[in-house]
Image (cartoon, helix red, strand yellow):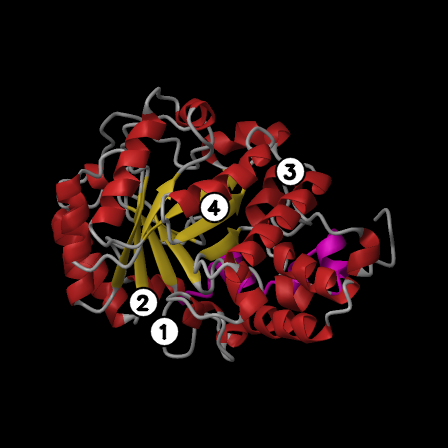
Amino acid sequence: MISVTKLLFATDYDGDKLRYTSSAHQMKHGAAAGMGPVVVWNSTQTCNLHCCHCYMDSDARTYEDELTTAEAKQFIDDLAAFRVPALLFSGGEPLLRPDFFELADYAASHGVRPTLSTNGTMITPELARRIQKIGVAYVGVSLDGLREVNDTFRGKAGAYAAAMQGIENCVAAGQRVGLRFTINHHNVMELDRIFDFIEAEKIDRVCFYHLVYSGRGEAMVADDVTPAESRRAMDTILARTRDFEARGLKKEILTVDNHCDGIYMYLQAKAAGDEPLAEQIWKFIAMNGGNRSGIAFAEVDPQGYVHPDQFTQHHTFGNVKERPFGEIWTDMSQPILAGLKDRKPLLKGRCAQCRFLSVCNGNFRTRAEARTGDFWQSDPACYLTDEEIGRKEVGK
């Protein structure tokens, strides 16, 4: 996750202390010194929508063997013991779990900050107030375009209107809320309208995700943006973020799942002759250390299996029903998990030859595996040129 706002203006938001600390890039098992990783829990696979890029391949049906309430509380106990700073309730649609509020409250009372990733369509005014009351730090609502574009992606007419109502209900309740927008070839032209939207609707935060080829997203490889489109998208994001800051609008703008974004920002500052900004950007991306799936970020699926992140569920390290999370997360007998914790010697191709490897850490492994069949090959979503990365053996 790259905080565009942090890199440009050195501003502080809630999650920055986990991403930008002097110890973050040195960690092997957690987000920062004395902490475990941020954990995404896909608490159910059931969903009321059918999104075309869903990494969980969720649908509106019941799935077997999902963690019970008692098992989930034991899991949260284990997270607290391992000093996990935050638990992101995701899905499917996590609000379809009848015990969501009980479990979110349980996490908060045990020192694990709950956050919520939702499609927003179920958030009534009453639910928004309950979410705010129990101390959910942040509600991220998935929205992949405006009106017809979003409804097409979500597989349901009216999904946009329902999500909009959910967002408005969160704002009215004083609940911090933001958007989660997955950039692809069909919606990249909507970026300017998304910035207009978050300003008009008084939304606090937006995360622009790069597409990962996982779950139903595997069928969308051809729908990913080109390198040129990625660069134009970043130019738009940077220009609009600067515009917000110039007008005194405090919005947290982030990009997710492509660490060459931070390097692109650094190179743009260098090209503009803004050395102080380039130094600031470098300082923060060096602190962060790039992609930290398997280190500072973990995922647990509805049945309790532990994975490096929510997009890499085909690599499994253990089950929290059988072993404590912390024991699983530090088990170096797992080749993929051990490799992720010290991956630089394992990387191949452009990633291995890149002069920015220390601040990117090989970007996203699942995309590389989806395209090449090799977990340690180059990430195809890197849009930096061979010249920019200092590649010496072009063509290999």
Earlier in the chain: of badge 1 and badge 2, it is 1
Task: In the rendered view, tell whether residue 186 sits above or below residue 179.
Answer: above
Earlier in the chain: of badge 2 and badge 4, it is 2
Q: Is residue 335 magenta?
A: yes
Taking the spot 48% from the left edge, 40% from the top edge, the residue there is 194
Front-most of residues 231 and 352: 231
Secondary element type, mark 3: helix
Earlier in the chain: of badge 4 and badge 3, it is 4
Which numbered disc, 2 or 4, marks the residue closer to the eye?
A: 2
User: Does the residue at mark 1 contact the one at mark 2 (Cβ under 8 Å)?
Assistant: yes
Percent coordinates x, y for residue 226 in the rendering: 69, 37
Q: Which residues are magenta?
A: 330-355
Write down the residue under mark 2: 84
Kindly identify the amino acid type of the residue bearing the numbered disc 2.
Val
Which numbered disc, 4 or 1, marks the residue closer to the eye?
A: 1
The reply, left or right, for residue 379 in relation to residue 152 is right
Residue 371 numbered mark, or none: 3
Percent coordinates x, y for residue 106 in the rendering: 15, 59
Percent coordinates x, y for residue 140 in the rendering: 35, 47
Spatial CA span between label 4 and label 3? 14 Å
Quarter where residue 59 is shown: top left
Which numbered disc, 3 or 2, marks the residue closer to the eye?
A: 2
Write down the residue under mark 1: 35
